[in-house]
């Protein structure tokens, strides 16, 4: 891992003090593209061998991931539709491998038995009215949820399906949450800043300047990375604190970065954005490696990513050039060594 204040350069660019090039990560190839869909995808998650996609119309679609290699058409890969939301599904997370949790603009948080494809519970939010729920994060048996409305972050005990604590975030529109170093909760959104809480005490520990609105957050070891509206990805080392300037991943995107997902081994970070790119970043040698080009050919915006740690496959979903076109791509590792390729 490089120095926390370092800037991450495009792959192939000169880097001062870099005498030896470390071997790049696994190679990826475009393995499958699934058909055009009628509704945009805003969230993705994997539970076992099922890929779930959350849509603008409130549907959650279930796809059998092994079938992606076997078919030339996506029609029979889709095998089930979950209906529990009235409008856009903003977030999907998986608890203990089998419970899918979904959040929507309708203010509902639904729990699903993923293998059985059935709803098991709807979390009842306290108070009157319903915020638009735009972000979820899991930290053990604690679920954090937030969105637009009160600006509060709710901490749920999934053992009791009840709110255990409310954080007064005062961030307005919270778009993303993640549990990071030592279980601290990080939140970001429209306010061009991140807030970091100790969830045990309920106290805000840090405020970090993100310099732009934040669309997504991921945690990798002691660092938290933010997908920003100014086409940059910024990372902070929470083990050091607010005094450390963020390291910035540059050169990969030319428009808003919409989603981030780490590879299972922590060596790579995947990103996607409104420029239609799906990019791969090598965090060990501080290199942007390449864009997965096939996604860019058909997508004007890529909104969601999901990574399968068992097969090391990456899934991306983008909006096509024609209205109503939505593509799901699967990217499969080829071998160790060499930059990521499409």
Image: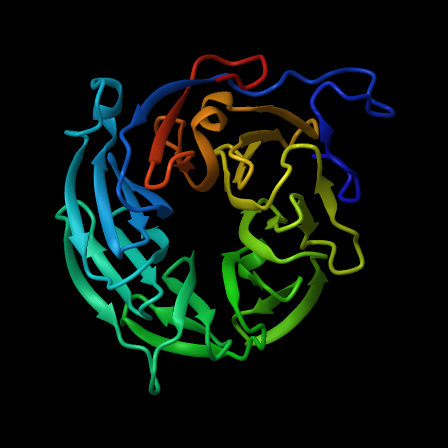
Q: Is any atom of residue 267 visible in this view?
A: no
Pick the front one: 342 or 281: 342
Image location of residue 212, percent across then percent down: 68, 56
Q: Residue at x 35, y 78 (%)?
A: 130
In the foreground, 33 or 141: 33
Q: Which of 71 and 188 is in front in this view?
A: 71
Q: In this view, does 299 lie above or below 100?
A: above
Q: Relative to residue 260, is residue 73 depicted above or below?
A: above
Residue 195 sits in quarter: bottom right
Residue in view at x 51 percent, y 34 percent? 276
Instruction: Tell which residue pokes out farthest to the bottom in this image.
Output: 128
Q: Is residue 81 above or below residue 18?
A: below
Point 35% across, 44% down: residue: 44
Residue 334 visible in image: yes
Q: Which of 195 and 322 is in front in this view?
A: 322
Q: In which quarter of the image is residue 189?
A: bottom right
The quarter of the image holding the N terminus is top right
């Amino acid at each position: 891992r490089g120095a926390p204040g370092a800037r991450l350069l495009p792959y192939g660019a000169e880097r001062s003090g870099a005498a030896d090039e470390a071997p790049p990560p696994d190679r990826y190839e475009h393995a499958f593209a699934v058909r055009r869909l009628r509704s945009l995808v805003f969230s993705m998650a994997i539970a076992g061998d099922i890929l779930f996609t959350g849509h603008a119309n409130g549907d959650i679609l279930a796809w059998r991931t092994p079938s992606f290699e076997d078919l030339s058409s996506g029609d029979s890969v889709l095998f089930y539709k979950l209906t529990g939301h009235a409008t856009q599904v903003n977030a999907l997370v998986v608890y203990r491998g089998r419970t899918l949790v979904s959040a929507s603009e309708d203010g509902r948080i639904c729990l699903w038995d993923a293998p059985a494809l059935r709803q098991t519970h709807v979390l009842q939010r306290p108070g009157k009215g319903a915020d638009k729920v735009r972000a979820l994060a899991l930290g053990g048996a604690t679920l954090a949820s937030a969105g637009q409305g009160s600006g509060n972050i709710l901490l749920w005990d999934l053992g009791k399906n009840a709110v255990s604590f409310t954080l007064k975030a005062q961030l307005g529109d919270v778009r993303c949450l993640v549990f990071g170093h030592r279980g601290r909760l990080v939140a970001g959104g429209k306010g061009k800043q991140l807030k970091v809480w100790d969830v045990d005490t309920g106290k805000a520990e840090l405020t970090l300047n993100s310099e732009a609105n934040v669309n997504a957050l991921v945690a990798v070891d002691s660092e938290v990375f933010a997908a920003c509206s100014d086409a940059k990805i910024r990372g902070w080392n929470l083990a050091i604190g607010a005094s450390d300037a963020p390291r910035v991943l540059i050169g990969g995107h030319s428009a808003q970065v919409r989603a981030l997902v780490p590879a299972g081994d922590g060596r790579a970070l995947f990103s996607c954005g409104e420029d239609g790119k799906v990019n791969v970043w090598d965090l060990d040698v501080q290199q942007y490696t390449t864009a997965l080009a096939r996604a860019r050919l058909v997508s004007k915006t890529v909104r969601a990513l999901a990574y399968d740690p068992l097969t090391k496959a990456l899934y991306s979903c983008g909006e096509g050039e024609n209205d109503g076109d939505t593509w799901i791509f699967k990217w499969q590792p080829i071998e160790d060594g060499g930059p990521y390729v499409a």
